[in-house]
Amino acid sequence: MSDDDLSGQLSKTNTALAEWAARSASESDALIERFERMGYEVRGKSVDEITEALKLPPTRPPQG
């Protein structure tokens, strides 16, 4: 498998994981809180907005 094929597959996998995590977070206050502590700004956002946020690096430093 070429590097381009691997990169494309990794991108698809990351997108699928972000979508799954966003759907799960929309039903779990604890998961929203965990993402917030990890530095992702997801509180009060829609599933689509959470998905997009999780595709990117956290916007804040993690909180202990």
Image (cartoon, grey):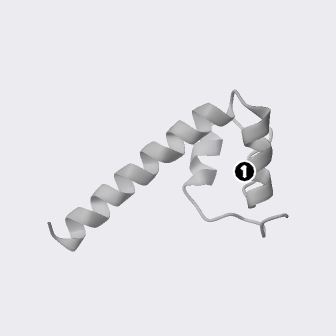
Give the residue at the far right of this rendering. 64
Q: Is residue 13 left or right of residue 32?
A: left
The image quarter in which residue 45 lies: top right
Mark 1, residue position: 35
Q: Looking at the picture, does residue 8 appear above or below residue 22?
A: below
Give the residue at the far top of this rendering. 27
Give the residue at the far left of this rendering. 1
Q: Quadrant of the N terminus?
A: bottom left
Q: Is residue 11 left or right of residue 62?
A: left
Residue for point 76% across, 48% down = 34
Residue 28's x, y, as percent? 73, 31
Residue 50's x, y, as percent? 64, 43
Neighbours of disc 1 within 10 Å: few (<14), some (14-19), many (20+): many
Residue for point 29% across, 56% down = 9
Residue type at mark 1 is: Phe
Secondary structure beneath label 1? helix
Residue 49's x, y, as percent? 64, 43
Q: Looking at the picture, does residue 2 appear above or below residue 13?
A: below
The image quarter in which residue 8 lies: bottom left
In depth, the one of 41 and 17 nearer the eye is 17
Residue for point 85% across, 64% down = 64
Task: Give the total number of marks visible in the rendering.
Answer: 1
In depth, the one of 64 and 44 nearer the eye is 64
Residue 35's x, y, as percent? 72, 50
In depth, the one of 36 and 45 nearer the eye is 36
Residue for point 51% across, 40% down = 19
